[in-house]
């Protein structure tokens, strides 16, 4: 029994991060954003979940799809990435992290339901954003949106995005887009979590549900 | 909790491919449903969660876990006073919801794994052996995150075979931690959690009453209130409330902290002759199901006395007690 907003292929009552996730590059780093609602059908299993998971010190992943599958994939990628980083003796690149996730998603595409956005900063390429939708494609982009709520904001992000944004502009861009998606998508809600990654480190913020820049 | 084959369990096995195609899938499922069930029962079974209410609340420096004590076998109460709070380590306990066999098995494996690690720590740190008890070694070295990692991976990798959800909590050297591991193998961490069929009732209590920095006594009251809400409003939960308070250096495990339903053993034993235990009565009821005459004997001597002391409308077999305490034969 598929609920509106569920991904087709989700088992009945499987916990889905039917969600809105987003990442945007700016000069010097990336901003990642996500809502915080995890649902089982029409029941909200966790209203304050954290969908932005750390894969390494400067590399994070936004998760959408089946919560169990994406948590398992993140765990595998975190493990491989830490071994790889220890072996080469430097920080891993975001490209490597994204490709590790992509290999798992592509080679197990029949058994997984995972849409991920891998973003972060590395000393080789600076800030990068990679999107891995269902099926295991990998796409490098300036900004990426994903999850069930993203369908409502394609037009908005295309209109609002500008090349060469500063950190503050990019943050406003991400916040506004996610707030709009949360207003229209039933499977997205709760708080907006924002993670800023640049060469100086990682900063986590959240915007509570009653302070959204746009709401119902 | 479910002790035997249940539609939901079969569904987890049968629905790895889309249901719409393939009559064989429906035939398989239909073979397991009770005769006379319709598509509506099938759909209802798909969305029904397993009978239990389990709850956990984090305080400043301690953690309170609570559970009801009813184990169901479809619509029969198989065990009126079962234990749903399992020990993983001296400082880590876990409430289980779902198929009881699966909960017991997975928590046993987690317990064994933590014990292996404890033995390793005892051999690696010679100062510990002899001086510190095993419990103290566990309190020092066992981490809730480790138990969570193990239990979550075990659940995720056997998701097609098992049906179990856990509220796992403990206090280690980094403080109190509470995790909720769902049936499909995903997990979340938070200040409070509720799982099982009574979770919605319990969660509504937790959402309205929980405060950050709640005291230990207030948390115990809150957990009892939440489980009571599950017991009152969910058919799959019932009987008593078990409570487990985990602190930095001690654990208080209250079996039947609150008894919401008095056990009816006294009425049964008095009527059938003194000295009989509950298990004798269960055996006798099973045996007397064989013949109609024996059935009516059982009804007269066992079922009626039990129902007469029932304080809530209830049904045993085909005999029902109505709200005005009259007994009706269906």
Image: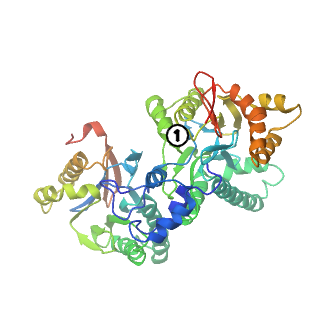
Q: Quadrant of residue A207?
A: top left
Residue A16 left/right relative to A137? right
Residue A21 visible in the current orientation: no
Image vertical order of residue B81 relative to residue A75, above or below: above
- Residue at position x 76%, y 34% from top? B302
Taking the spot 52% from the left edge, 33% from the top edge, the residue there is B233
Say whether residue B163 is left or right of residue B272.
Answer: left
| Chain that bears disc 1 | B
Residue B14 position, x and y percent, is 50, 66
Q: Secondary structure at mark 1?
A: loop
Residue B264: x, y in percent?
74, 30
Classify the position of the C terminus of chain A by image quarter.
top left
Count of numbered circles in the view:
1
Farthest-out residue, top: B324
Which quadrant holds the N terminus of chain A? bottom left
Residue A159 location (% of width, % of height)? 10, 58
- In percent of width and height, residue B43 lies at 44, 53
Task: Check disc 1 and report the residue beneath it.
Answer: B198
For label 1, the crowd category at 10 Å Cα-Cα, with few meaning under 14, some 14 to 19 and many 20 or more, is: many
Q: Nearer the viewer, residue A201 or B67?
A: B67
Q: Quick check: B52 above or below A14?
A: above
Q: From the viewer's perspective, is residue B85 above or below residue A128?
A: above
Say which of A109 and A11 sits in front: A11
- Left of B32 or right of it: where is A193? left
Q: Is residue A176 left or right of residue B55?
A: left
Residue B148 in sight here: yes
Q: Nearer the viewer, residue B284 or B83?
A: B284
Q: For residue B204, what is the image quadrant?
A: top left
């Amino acid at each position: 029994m598929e609920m509106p907003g569920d991904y087709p292929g989700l088992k009945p009552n499987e916990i889905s991060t039917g969600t809105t996730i987003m990442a945007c590059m700016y000069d010097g780093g990336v901003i990642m954003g996500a809502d915080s609602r995890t649902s089982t059908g029409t029941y909200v299993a966790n209203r304050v979940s954290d969908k932005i998971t750390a894969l390494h010190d400067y590399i994070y992943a936004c998760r959408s799809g089946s919560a169990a599958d994406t948590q398992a994939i993140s765990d595998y990628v975190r493990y491989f990435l830490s071994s790889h980083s220890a072996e080469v003796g430097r920080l891993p690149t975001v490209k490597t992290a994204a490709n590790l996730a992509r290999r798992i998603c592509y080679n197990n595409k029949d058994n997984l339901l995972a849409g991920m956005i891998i973003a972060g900063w590395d000393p080789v390429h600076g800030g990068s954003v990679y999107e891995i939708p269902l099926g295991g494609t990998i796409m490098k982009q300036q900004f990426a949106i994903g999850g069930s709520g993203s369908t409502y904001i394609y037009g908005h992000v295309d209109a609002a995005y500008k090349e060469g944004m500063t950190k503050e502009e990019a943050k406003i861009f991400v916040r506004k887009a996610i707030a709009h998606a949360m207003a229209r998508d039933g499977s997205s809600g709760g708080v907006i979590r924002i993670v800023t990654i640049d060469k100086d480190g990682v900063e986590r913020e959240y915007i509570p549900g009653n302070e959204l820049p746009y709401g119902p | 909790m479910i002790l035997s084959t249940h539609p939901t369990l079969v569904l987890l096995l049968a629905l790895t491919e889309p249901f719409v195609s393939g009559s064989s899938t429906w035939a398989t499922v239909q073979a397991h449903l009770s005769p006379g069930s319709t598509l509506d029962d099938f759909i209802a079974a798909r969305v029904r969660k397993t009978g239990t209410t389990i709850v956990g609340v984090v305080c400043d420096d301690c953690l309170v876990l609570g559970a009801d004590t009813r184990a169901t076998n479809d619509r029969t109460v198989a065990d009126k006073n079962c234990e749903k709070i399992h020990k993983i380590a001296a400082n880590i306990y876990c409430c289980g919801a779902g198929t009881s066999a699966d909960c017991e098995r997975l928590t046993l494996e987690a317990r064994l794994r933590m014990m292996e690690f404890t033995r390793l720590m005892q051999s690696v740190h010679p100062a510990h052996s002899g001086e510190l008890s095993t419990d103290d070694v566990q309190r020092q070295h066992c981490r809730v995150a480790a138990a969570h990692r193990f239990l979550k991976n075990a659940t995720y990798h056997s998701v097609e075979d098992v049906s179990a959800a856990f509220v796992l909590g403990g206090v280690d050297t980094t403080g109190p931690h509470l995790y909720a591991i769902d049936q499909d193998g995903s997990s979340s961490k938070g200040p409070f959690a509720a799982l099982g069929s009574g979770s919605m009732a319990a969660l509504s209590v937790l959402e309205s009453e929980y405060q950050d920095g709640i005291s230990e006594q207030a948390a115990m009251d809150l957990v009892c209130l939440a489980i009571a809400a599950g017991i009152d409003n969910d058919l799959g939960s019932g009987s008593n409330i078990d409570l487990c308070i985990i602190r930095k250096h001690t654990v208080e495990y209250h079996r039947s902290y609150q008894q919401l339903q008095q056990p009816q053993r006294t009425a049964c034993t008095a009527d059938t002759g003194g000295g009989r235990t509950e298990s004798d009565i269960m055996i006798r009821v099973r045996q007397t199901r064989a013949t109609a005459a024996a059935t009516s004997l059982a009804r007269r001597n066992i079922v009626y006395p039990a129902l007469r002391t029932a304080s809530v409308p209830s049904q045993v077999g085909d005999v029902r007690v109505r709200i005005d305490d009259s007994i009706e034969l269906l």
